[in-house]
Image (spheres, helix red, strand yellow):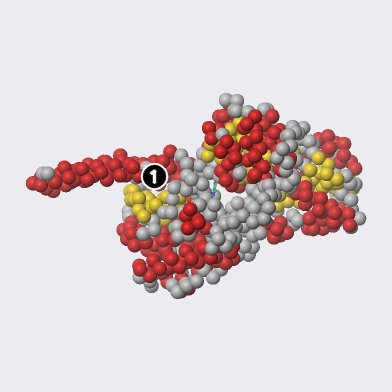
């Protein structure tokens, strides 16, 4: 590949040595570089391809890192990374020890704000701008956010604040590619993209001009009047009216791939004495034909061959997401009250089979996790059966709604919590480390986790049958075999655990697919003379009290293993329950330590935090031999 210009870009200062025509060539080189590099590492390709020109124009016009650019989510900021000194390390993207797939303040002085979750950029940028003014500093602040982000309520909370503030040197750039991960949804999306209205406005403007030309003698006065009429009409007829009404100067829509136009416009806007909203339109996947044709598929990619694009290889194994989609469709077939809800993740969560079959009971609410939960609460009030499918990390947003709207009113909403546990390459913003911690302490909540696809089927059926309150099912993105599509689901007894293999002295209670890990650890332990009992703790709340009361006395050590933060997780909950039941046993809790887990291959991360079969077995061996009940004598 020819990277004549790119090879000389080590910081934004180097951009400034190039002419605008050379910058256009540079953008081409960056695209090739992105495709080549991401095809090896995997990553968020399509969104990044869409903002190559914008990223170059911003760093060309602004004085970064003094001027601050806040990227929403950060998945689209690969060009920003490449031109701010990370070109040579770009091949380590998302790898353990390499650079992050999102922005991180600790990674570069050019990353003025870290993210991974959507719709935060406007609030953060406004905070930075107000901080700047309070400290009498002088720099510009730019927030870049997508039309998808604009489906998230946080954006409106920020706009409400910013618009009334009149904050200077503040540019909000709406990168409108009509796509969230999937096609964007909702009324604002329609409003933004209603170019028919813009056309109407243009037609109206032409008519006003033509009309006035018939009165040449009236001259200046009339042209002033014409401008006022145009402004009024623009407010009513174009997409900017909403933002203008909320206190922003609206500019656009502008072709976000026209580098020269972008540079000219940013130069004009950069020192504006009030907030400006620049609306640009871009093509997700721009410059790589397969990604332009299928932007959703290329949103986040595994390594692939650039010449062939994404091709499925190997036999298709059922993932938990596939099982979820199939089983929800089955429940939907059984009962018209079943409703499927996603917050902008139809393909990621696997809910698509239900959406395809029952479009009138399918709701993609946009990046609006909080709303999705209250919406489900309302549906449950009307005796519907809502299933809300959300990633563990994004459900953090809806903590209050789960408590205040669902659990407090004891409404039977089913939460299907995807990407629970360590997610791997997306890293610390996306790890599903906390869902047990934020759910277990909520009264009325049933919390469960299947060890495989068949059990997910049973738990979904059990949740469907359960009408006494909220029911959560958490599972990771991993293979869910065994799964028998044709098996009839079984309703499980609430709180029932399953003994996978009987043993003595040591019991290992494992959550979800860690049951398999526990069985592997047990084999290692057996070779070392320890014969543990392995239990599938498929219900984390309620616990299996019968088992606790009747079986625990057989063990000298009870180990819990979970892919959740140890603080507030299954082990911690079990300890409290044992205390209140008056059961004393030597306890070892293995889980995610009290730290943010970085990015990298799942296997490497699990090894790092001690959650693979070998590490677990080692800890159990050492622990079961220690006497940690030393009696401290008080003098
Ligand atoms: C709170 C939250 N929910 C869901 C996601 C998953 N997600 C990542 S990017 C994205 C789409 C963003 O679309 P847009 O803002 O238009 O940016 P684009 O990718 O089009 O540039 C979604 C839904 C997220 N990052 N944060």
Q: Which of these two is toward me, 452 or 249? A: 452
Check the image and report above or below for 171 versus 236: below
Q: Which of these two is toward me, 489 or 240? A: 489
Number of residues whose C-alpha sits closer than 10 Å to that of mark 1, classed few (under 14), some (14–19) or many (20 or more): some
Residue 28 visible to the viewer: yes
Residue at figure coordinates x 63%, y 28% from the top left: 335
Q: Mark 1 points at which residue?
A: 193
Residue at figure coordinates x 33%, y 50% from the top left: 251
Residue 463: x, y in percent? 68, 33
User: Could you tell whether 494 is left or right of 596 in the image?
Assistant: right
Residue 406 visible to the viewer: no
Residue 101: x, y in percent? 56, 59
- At mark 1, the secondary structure is loop
Residue 634: x, y in percent? 85, 49
Q: Which of these two is toward me, 349 or 119? A: 349
Residue 481: x, y in percent? 73, 47
């Amino acid at each position: 590949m020819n990277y004549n210009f790119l090879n000389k870009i080590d910081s934004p200062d180097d951009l400034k040595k190039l002419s605008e025509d050379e910058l256009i060539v540079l953008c081409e080189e960056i695209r090739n570089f992105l495709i080549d590099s991401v095809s090896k590492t995997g990553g968020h390709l399509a969104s990044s391809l869409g903002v190559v020109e914008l990223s170059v124009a911003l760093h060309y016009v602004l004085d970064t890192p003094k001027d601050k650019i806040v990227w929403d989510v950060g998945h689209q900021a690969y060009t920003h990374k490449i031109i701010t000194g990370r070109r040579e390390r770009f091949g380590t993207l998302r790898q353990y020890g390499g650079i992050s797939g999102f922005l991180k303040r600790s990674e570069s002085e050019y990353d003025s704000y870290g993210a991974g979750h959507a719709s935060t950029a406007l609030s953060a940028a406004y905070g930075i701008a107000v901080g700047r003014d309070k400290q009498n500093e002088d720099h510009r602040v730019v927030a870049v956010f997508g039309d998808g982000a604009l489906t998230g309520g946080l954006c409106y909370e920020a706009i409400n604040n910013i618009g009334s503030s009149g904050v200077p040197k503040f540019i909000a750039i709406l990168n409108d590619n009509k796509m969230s991960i999937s096609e964007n949804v909702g009324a604002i999306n329609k409003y933004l993209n209603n170019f028919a209205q813009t056309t109407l406005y243009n037609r109206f403007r032409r008519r006003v001009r033509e009309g006035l030309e018939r009165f040449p003698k009236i001259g200046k006065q009339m042209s002033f009047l014409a401008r006022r009429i145009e402004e009024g009409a623009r407010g009513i007829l174009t997409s900017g009216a909403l933002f203008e009404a909320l206190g922003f100067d609206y500019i656009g829509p502008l072709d976000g791939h026209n580098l020269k136009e972008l540079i000219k416009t940013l130069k004009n806007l950069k020192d504006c004495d009030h907030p400006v909203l620049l609306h640009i339109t871009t093509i997700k996947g721009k410059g790589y034909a397969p990604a332009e044709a299928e932007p959703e598929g290329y949103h986040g990619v595994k390594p692939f061959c650039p010449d062939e694009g994404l091709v499925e290889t190997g036999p298709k194994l059922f993932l938990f997401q596939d099982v979820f989609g199939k089983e929800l469709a089955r429940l939907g077939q059984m009962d018209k009250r079943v409703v499927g809800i996603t917050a902008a993740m139809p393909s990621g969560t696997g809910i698509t089979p239900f959406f395809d079959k029952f479009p009138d009971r399918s709701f993609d609410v946009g990046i609006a996790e909080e709303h999705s939960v209250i919406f489900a609460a309302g549906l449950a009030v009307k005796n519907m059966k809502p299933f809300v499918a959300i990633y563990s990390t994004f459900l953090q947003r809806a903590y209050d709604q789960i408590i205040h709207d669902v659990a407090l009113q004891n409404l039977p909403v089913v939460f299907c919590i995807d990407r629970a546990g360590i997610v791997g390459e997306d890293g610390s913003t996306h790890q599903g480390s906390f869902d047990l911690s934020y759910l277990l302490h909520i009264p009325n909540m049933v919390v469960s986790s299947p060890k495989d696809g068949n059990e997910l089927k049973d738990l979904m059926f059990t949740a469907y049958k359960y009408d006494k309150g909220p029911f959560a099912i958490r599972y990771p993105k991993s293979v869910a075999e065994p799964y028998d599509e044709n098996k009839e689901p079984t309703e499980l007894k609430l709180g029932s655990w399953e003994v996978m293999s009987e043993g003595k002295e040591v019991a290992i209670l494992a959550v979800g697919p860690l049951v398999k890990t526990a069985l592997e650890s047990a084999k290692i332990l057996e070779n070392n003379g320890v014969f543990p009992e392995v239990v599938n703790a498929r219900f984390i709340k309620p616990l299996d009290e019968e088992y606790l009361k009747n079986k625990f006395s057989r063990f000298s050590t009870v180990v819990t293993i979970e892919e959740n933060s140890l603080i507030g997780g299954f082990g911690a909950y079990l300890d409290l329950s044992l205390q209140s039941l008056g059961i004393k046993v030597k306890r070892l809790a293995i889980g995610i330590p009290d730290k943010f887990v970085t990015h990298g291959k799942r296997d490497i991360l699990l090894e790092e935090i001690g959650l693979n079969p070998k590490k677990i077995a080692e800890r159990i061996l050492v622990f079961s031999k220690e006497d940690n009940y030393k009696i401290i004598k008080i003098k």
